Image: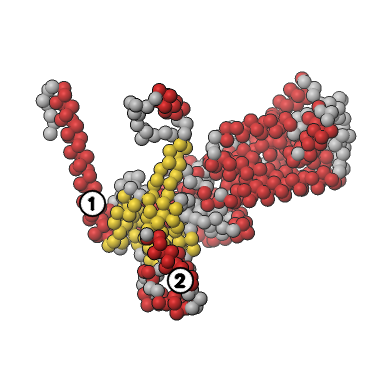
Amino acid sequence: MKRDVRAARKRARVGGGQSRQDQIIIPDDQLTPDALAARYGLAPVGRRPALLPYIREIVRWLPFTVMLGTSRAASKNRNSYLGQIWSFLNPILNSLVYVLVFGLLLDVSRGVDNVIGFIVVGTFMYRSFNDVVQNGGRSIRRNQNLVKSLPFPRAVMPIAAAVSEAVMLLPELLVMLIIIKVSSAIPNMTPVIWDWTLILLIPAVILLYIFSLGVAFMVARVISFIPDLGNLLPFCLRLLMYTSGAIFPVSRYFSNETIQNILSYQPVAVMLDLVRQVTLSESTIPFTWSHWLWATGWAVSFFTIGLVIFWRAEARYGRE
Amino acid sequence: MSEKDPAQESTSRIPSVIVDDVHVKYKVIGSKGSKVQAHHKDSLLKKLVRRGAKITSAGSTEIHALRGVSFIAHDGEAIGILGTNGSGKSTLLRAIAGLQPVSHGSVYMRGRASLMGVGAALVKNLTGERNIMIGCLALGMSVSEVKEKFNDIVKFAELGDAVYLPMSTYSHGMAARLRFAISTAITPDVLIVDEALSTGDSAFKTKSRRRIDEIREAAGTVFVVSHSSATIKSMCSRAIWIDQGTVKMDGAVDEVVDAYRAFTRHSRAERRRRRRLRRKRRAALNGSGKVES
């Protein structure tokens, strides 16, 4: 009943809306709320902005995003004697475990020239991907308080998680390169010779992060509405690690060419091989520009699709 | 063109916030409350499922926090929000600030609202200095603005050199003062004060009251939530009483506060009466006629 009256008023206003005189006749207290809002220039609150203004908002909030990400990274290891040294020790020890078990004990290398280099690059890079997806994916849930008290675009949370991972990246990459160089000196391993392509390590890692952030956006949306799936995430990521050739060249275990191609051109495998191309001298992973096309394609499409998926639920985060 | 609109005839009544038939429902995941009561007639299977859900705390409950709230706030108004715990006050304020998704209806506003809650952005084991930066950026300030206001914030929070120590070393009062100083560093169009007045010692209280008054004068519209109806009476001209997710009363502050006080007094008396009755009945069951007055 009340609705009908409102709708009728609205229709009357819209019908004669062009003539200014008509508007003047209707006093404020008889206008529908939305018409009243329009008259005084009030904007609706809590609605999802269009995609382009949303991206502009994200850029405007970038200083906060970076500050939040770096601050969280800086506070992470405050409660241990070794402090930030743990951010190096963690990936080193992690890769050491895989080198010991898969490289030396099980020897699953299947014709890899420098097993240590292969595994170290795989585990360091996969760890970055893994952490961005895990922390970025859970960032909305984990920071409910923040999401509920401040009105920044929600995409800030996953991006801050990625920034937080990227803070220690440069020294981590240095450690990775040092391990590779040291492994060259070990008798059984083929020595690694670097050329100018080593400089491409930086863009390769940037592509990896863009791709990871895209995945994190998708995961963040899913987990913030169905938190149960957060419990499945670690298992999915571990499965992905073994099927992406992070530790052993998984595609060489299959003779079927289609399966081989799928396994070696899926996005994570492409990203890992991209880094191996420029940091190792594996005869089976030569430097090819086509791989860069693949990597760029995957990174851009995952990031775009992820951002759109995340943006579509922008007005609904923090509902619980 | 819009300046020539009929608004001219009532210049003092320019709407700044319009809340139109707002409903908020949210889901609480993972807790089937005690609301679900067992029925003797239920089948064994149903009982088992309910028991199982209770033990594993699986499932979800939907809460209908706001049930059709409508009002219009105008420029220059200070509106007190009254209501018992769980009546939907905070949900309403979050909905106004655009932080609580609305399931039906809409909220319109001019400019930006600020809910004085910057605490969640701060990182405990970093210095106060760093946290001022984080907090101010979280409120949407630019880096140069923060640098400009840094000294004011430190001075207002009475931190001194402690600003270079990690926040985890701060006393309860120091941390609260810092949060307050950061939160009030900006002047929003719509200010929402949620129980933030009870910060620190009495000297700081008067200081913070003065600060809020300043902001109130600069801001277009202010909403104040407080349990103390005296606070609301002293700060606001209008009050809205929220009860069980609906507007129970909306009008001049004195009227609403008096009605609210009468209501709470009544319901407190009612609770007391019921408790006494229960005790009496229990005593009668026990056979001994000992009844406390």
Q: Look at the numbered discs 1 and 2 and tell me whether their residues touch, using CB distance below 8 Å.
A: no
- Identify residue for label 2: A13
Foreground pick, A58 / A309: A309
State whether residue B245 is above or below residue B62: below
Protein chain holding label 2: A
Q: Which type of secondary structure does the marked residue at label 2 adopt?
A: helix
Quadrant of residue A257 in the image? top right
Q: Amino acid at mark 1?
A: Arg
Disc number placed over residue B108 in the picture, else none: none
Quadrant of residue B20 in the image? bottom left
Name the residue rendered at 80%, 22% in the picture: A107
Q: Going by the image, does A266 lie left or right of B129?
A: right
Where does the image place residue A3, in percent across and percent down from the top left? 40, 60
Q: Residues within 10 Å of mark 2 (few under 14, many from 20)?
A: some
State whether residue A245 is above or below residue A204: above
Q: Going by the image, does A14 lie left or right of A282?
A: left
Q: Going by the image, does A36 lie left or right of B148?
A: left
- Identify residue for label 1: B261
> Is residue B202 at least partly visible in the picture?
no
